[in-house]
Image (tube, rainbow, N blue to C red):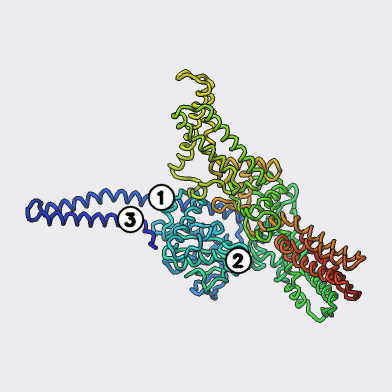
Amino acid sequence: MGRRPRPGSFWRRAAAVLGVLMVGAGAIVILRSRPTGDVDPFGALVGVVGAVIGVAGLLLPLWEHRQSRREGAVRALVRAVEGHEDKQYRNILGPGSTFLPVRFRFSAAPDGSPGDAGSEEWQTVVDRYLGLPGPVRRLAVTGGPGTGKSLLARELTRALAGRHDEEAGDGVPVLLALSSWGGPQDGEDPRSEGFHLAFRRWAVQQVSQTYGQPSAQVEEALTDKAVIVLDGLDELDPGGAEERPRAAALLRYLAVNRDCFRNVVVTCRSDVYEQFEGPSPLAGAGRAELLPVPPDMALDYLKSRSEWSHSGLTERWDGVLDEMRVSPGGPLARALSTPWRLTMIANAFHVRGEGGVGWLRDPSELVTRWGRDVLWERYRAEEEDFADEHGLPGRLWSLFTPEERLRSAEDSAAADDMSSEVEEYLLSLFVPSVVAEHPRDPDRYPAERVSAWLTLLSTHRGVDRFAGTRYLSLIADLRADLTPHQMWPLGGRRLVRTLHGSLYTLFALVVAGLAAAALRDPWDVAFCYPVVVAAGFSAFVAWSDRADIDPSSRFRTGGRAGGLLDLYVRTVGMPMVGVYFGGMFGFVVSANLTRAPLPDVPTTVWVATVAGALLGIPLVQNRSTETYTTVRGALPGQRHKIFLVCAALRGRLPLRLGRFLDWAHEGGLLRVDGHAYRFRHDEFEQYLWRSHWRPEILPPCLAAADAALRTGQTAVLPTRAGRRMLEQLDTLDQHGVDLYATCMMGVGIAGSNAKTALRAWAGHLATGTVDPEAEAVLRDRAVQAVRRFHEAASRAG
């Protein structure tokens, strides 16, 4: 378990060892020659010193070259980090120069306690981090969903890159998305050197792909002083696993492995972070706990996004401000309590009307639909229904003060349902508002198509073994993998694979047939053999059903921009190899088929040579450069093009998918992590995923509940009707869990209650018991439960 040598230590060790060897050799020669007097001791000493100085003169330029290369790699990576993170930062902020009201409470206590410090603005996080006691600085950024953890991590990375002082020996800050880390291999011990080397290789690969730097330079730049910002500790174990093995292994690695990165920043949801053992799961770390946005700061942000505020006309937000102040725990206050939801509201209600006159939407509709008065009425109605259904006395609301009644409503399930409805409504407006306010080209794509395309992209979870509605509950918590060369299943998995494999198989058969018919001479076979092998191997791989069909992508660590050698190989070397072997194959085959005498060959041979040279290029090198992350390799490039054609012909995605992804990235709908796109926010991605699968789950469940209710109401033979109802409720049993995954929580609860009430009524009928009073009670409960199920479904859209 050896520590990785520090930069430059190799040359110091080599010089020391060489010096010791030379001194030892000189001493042996002097001692052996002393009796005979063949060697002058003083001259030998001078010679040894001269040799040491000469060798040092050779090593010093090499050491200086290595040092300058390392410093150049650090400077290049710092510039790349600053430029990339600044662009992502601007995309998140959206139009204008307003700052999201992200606040945090900082604590440097080693036990992770929050301390007595007040709230601070997000711009001070870099000062707080640099103020941690060195030389090792660690920070945990925690908070609820949508509170700005990723934004704070990006701001910290960007600010550290801007303040980087190479002379002071500052480390390079880099931001890595933990969702792309595969975790330890085969339960490897986090204390082992293998774990560290695997994690470091992953970090080098991600930095290289994210910031477009050669992996060799990244390896040089990521020294012990580098600041590694790891975003999304809670995303390491999707599906809500209680043990969270990957996250626990990473925290243990950072705590006990002596070779691990020292300066680390981790972002994680507060509830997940507090599940790990110990008061401070990230060893030796301070903590920045993100806080909810107070109403005044939320309104200030919304006004700053409004052009009316420049003229002092802010009356359109007065109703929202009054609602938030009077009902701080109501649905609207909850919707405005996080920077992400503030962004959605700002986008939705700052879109101009037709011709740029007026506003398209009025914020007062939020108060009208989800204000405190509506909350109170819904809460009172639900309480009265529950009391009537179970024969309980109703509450004497006249004895409660208005404030007490409002607080009771804010703590109820009705408030939770209304808060979810507000969020769903704002999410439904996010795409149209972003499209209307796109900073560069708002009229390029219709909002309806953008929403449909993004909805389809959200379903690509990259899990091949889980397909169809049977596995929705298993993949609901996963995240979409929008790596361009792995998105081909969206065009139709069987169709794209069959077309790709058939084309390459046909090509391989043609090549093999021409070679078998024309080649007789051993030298001709030797020249053309590589083309036949390459065609056969390509045909074999083209039938692969894996999302990632490029074998080299699992070993390649280079970024989008490599060094001079990598650039030469990609742009000149590989195409020339294809030209050479393809042209040689075309020349030899055509010359043998036409029996052309050398050197007087006919024109057809030269035409075949040129055709073979042109076909040889895509056989070994084919790239699609329309996307930000680029599709590399011959086979992935060809399958990507087939996928684009199939998806466009079937109306699923645009033909120029890469341009659309870049356009969505510029508008703030997507972001870039490493070599893949990701949705702007997890809540946005989950909303799109739910809206795709909801039509396949909710209508059958509603239909099954209605059918069971009609069967019971029109029953002639109660026993047979009860059994028939139980059969009809199988659909609700099959999709009961999926309702929670594809709909709001209130819809899932209403569906479960409807199933329970209908099953109780059906069970009573199936027994054949004659009890009109009990049957009436069960029937009324089932009718009310199905009605509430429909109401919840209608509010969910």
Horizontal placement of 496 versus 523: left or right? right
Q: From this viewpoint, is residue 219 visible?
A: yes
Q: Of the numbered discs in the image, which one, if any, rests on residue 687?
A: none
Give the Cα distance between marks 1 and 2.
44 Å
Quarter residue 304 falls in: bottom right
Give the Cα distance between marks 1 and 3.
19 Å
Amino acid type indicated by mark 2: Ala
The residue labelled by disc 1 is 72
Please tell me which residue lies in front, 65 or 591.
Answer: 591
Give the Cα distance between marks 3 and 2.
44 Å
Q: Of the numbered discs in the image, which one, if any, rests on residue 241?
A: 2
The residue labelled by disc 3 is 10
Q: Closer to us: mark 1 or mark 3?
A: 3
In terms of sequence position, does the residue under pointer 3 or pointer 2 come before the other?
3
In terms of sequence position, does the residue under pointer 1 or pointer 2 come before the other?
1
At which x and y percent is residue 526? 45, 32
Position above or below: 632 against 35: above
Q: Closer to us: mark 1 or mark 2?
A: 2
Whether residues under marks 1 and 3 lie with C-beta atoms below 8 angstroms apart, the answer is no
Name, please, the residue furthest toward the right: 716
Q: Closer to us: mark 3 or mark 2?
A: 2
At which x and y percent is residue 739? 73, 62
Horizontal placement of 632 versus 689: left or right? left
**Image quadrant containing the N terminus:** bottom left
At which x and y percent is residue 178? 54, 59
Residue under the image location 38 percent in, 62 percent down: 2
Q: How many marks?
A: 3
Whether residues under marks 1 and 2 lie with C-beta atoms below 8 angstroms apart, the answer is no
Amino acid type indicated by mark 1: Gly
Position above or below: 572 against 97: above
| Label 2: which secondary element | loop
